[in-house]
Amino acid sequence: MILAEKDDDMRDLRVAVIGAGPAGIYAADILTTNHESASVDIIERLPAPYGLVRYGVAPDHPRIKEIIKALLRILEKPRIRFIGNVDYGTDLTLDELRMFYDAVIFATGAMDDRRLDIPGIDLPGSHGAADFVSWYDAHPDVPREWALDAEQIAVIGAGNVALDVARMLAKTADEQLVTEIPANVYEGLKANRVSDVHVFARRGPAQIKFTPLELRELAHSPNVDVVVHPEGFEIDEASEQAIHASRQTKQVVNTLLGWIDNLPSTKPRRIHIHFCEAPVAVLGTDRVTGLRTERTELTGDGNVRGTGIITDWPVQAVYRAVGYLSSPVPGVPFDHVDGVIPNVAGRVLDAQGAPLPATYVTGWIKRGPVGLIGHTKSDASETIDCLLADLDALPTAASTDPDSVLAYLTGKGIEHTNTHGWERLDAHETSLGEHAGRPRIKIVERDEMVEFSRDTPYSRENSPAQVGQKAHA
Ligand SMILES: Cc1cc2nc3c(=O)[nH]c(=O)nc-3n(C[C@H](O)[C@H](O)[C@H](O)COP(=O)(O)OP(=O)(O)OC[C@H]3O[C@@H](n4cnc5c(N)ncnc54)[C@H](O)[C@@H]3O)c2cc1C
Ligand SMILES: NC(=O)c1ccc[n+]([C@@H]2O[C@H](COP(=O)([O-])OP(=O)(O)OC[C@H]3O[C@@H](n4cnc5c(N)ncnc54)[C@H](OP(=O)(O)O)[C@@H]3O)[C@@H](O)[C@H]2O)c1
């Protein structure tokens, strides 16, 4: 990490971070820690911060959701402000941001599903995992209803999102009643008619991207059996090497092997795991009636080829969990193949491949939608290193008054939220949860979120966290 050297005439630095997911929040933290007169505004389109920690991590993973407490401590730092409910590109353009900030860091993450180009993928009953995740995690901008009327469901993909989706589809609504899910999600899950969820990996057990803890968790439900199908459970020499080289791969394969001889029990629902089955087509005319797969075989280098053996699986819904995809960000170039803003180590590149002045990127929009929350920290660190190395070349924004951007937004009629507002919403959600013996119950409606976090002048003294600390002192 490059530290900005302290000297008496060190310039003030005002930076806008776009996106209040972990990548944006860590970038703000690292910058303000390493530059004594830097201040950062984190501009977020949603009324609440935390990105996929709030709207991606599954509700039955409360321990991971707890990360928001550490992220809140960063938002409460004196030189960091959260400005929520402001959509970059609609409410503020890059030219407008340049009036108020010396540099801009994009941390807009990913929210959509990667496409899977097979026939029938757009049939009713064929869903992207990201849409389902947004529904069960109570994202304010998606429909409130989700039809769970299929008895047999296929999940395509063998990453941790596929595991989340399979688990959320298979567990009962009452099992989820200890989590933060709101009433509409509980009601949706209660109507779920599923009996069998089939997860399809296109490669073998040593090539899947599940992590051991998340895989083992499948078997924790009192209502769900895990069935590992031996057909396609191929372990070649390259797989042996992969197992030998990685403790994680070894644990995953051992867990699967332990399940392969599972005898059927009386549990009402099952998650089946199939290996070496690649999706070929979603079947149906008016809606999904099946999934066609082709058996694959390992080619000795971790890859697979088709064998021509085709199977049609009678399912009434298909969920593809083949990766997330970032959206283009107005005003900066976008690589539509990898779904990232082109950059070198976090410096955004223009169409000619030269660094775009005072413009940076971090998190999933920088390197693609893979990796854990913790990985966004090292990412942010690399980006901030670049920004600090460029300090002398950064322009100075026309306006140096930190409140002018807030006045500008208000003048445009944009009601923005702040850290204090989030603390109010957080306290409200937590108190709703307390009454039901749950960690929180999420507010779903955007208007209601804004209502509870309505902008009041933020002062560290009157923040609930500070008041709580004083009460303990
Ligand atoms: C379903 C799912 C479950 C996951 N579970 C785990 C887990 O259990 N443990 C783990 O370690 N990792 C998990 N991850 C990975 C983790 O969520 C990511 O590594 C991390 O969230 C990426 O951080 P980010 O800040 O780059 O992006 P994001 O978290 O996506 O944050 C981006 C933020 O930018 C905002 N934004 C986007 N566009 C604009 C705009 N135009 N204007 C203003 N704001 C904008 C978004 O609203 C969002 O708040 C999961 C990922 C998914 C998809
Ligand atoms: N609890 C957690 O810790 C947690 C939870 C959720 C997500 N995450 C993290 O978030 C990141 C994103 O997860 P993810 O599951 O979206 O992505 P991922 O880990 O990249 O997995 C994507 C899966 O989709 C498969 N796939 C891609 N294209 C396909 C195609 N055309 N046909 C069939 N299968 C296809 C991939 O198979 P191939 O390998 O063959 O390409 C892979 O199995 C990961 O780093 C993940 O660990 C973590």
Image (cartoon, helix red, strand yellow):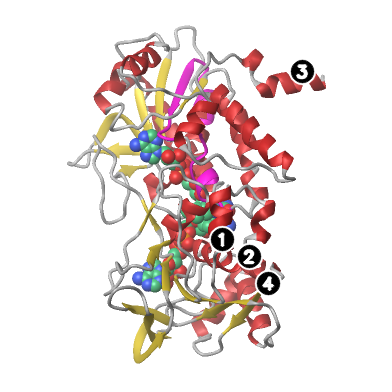
Q: Label 3 is placed on what type of residue? A: Lys
- Disc number for residue 189: 1
Q: In the rendered structure, are the residues bearing label 4 and label 3 in contact, judged by CB atoms less than 8 Å apart?
A: no
Q: Earlier in the sequence, mark 4 or mark 2?
A: 2
Q: Earlier in the sequence, mark 4 or mark 3?
A: 4
Q: Label 4 is placed on what type of residue? A: Asn
Q: Label 2 is placed on what type of residue? A: Thr
Q: Rounded to the nearest whole Å, what is the CA distance between mark 4 and mark 2?
A: 7 Å
Mark 3, residue position: 470
Q: Rounded to the nearest whole Å, what is the CA distance between mark 3 and mark 1?
A: 41 Å
Mark 2, residue position: 172
Which SS class for mark 2?
loop
Which one is nearer the viewer's eye here, 389 or 103? 103
Q: In the rendered structure, are the residues bearing label 2 and label 1 in contact, judged by CB atoms less than 8 Å apart?
A: yes
For the point 63% across and 32% down, which residue is it? 428
How dense is the environment of label 1, judged by Cα within 10 Å: few (below 14), some, or many (20 and up)?
many
Q: Earlier in the sequence, mark 2 or mark 1?
A: 2
Q: Rounded to the nearest whole Å, what is the CA distance between mark 4 and mark 1?
A: 14 Å
Asked whether mark 2 and ligand 2 are closer than 8 Å, the reply comes as: no
For the point 52% across and 50% down, which residue is it? 137
Mark 4, residue position: 223
Which one is nearer the viewer's eye here, 402 or 272? 272
Which SS class for mark 1?
helix
Looking at the rendering, the stretch of residues picked out in magenta corresponds to 29-58
How dense is the environment of label 2, judged by Cα within 10 Å: few (below 14), some, or many (20 and up)?
many
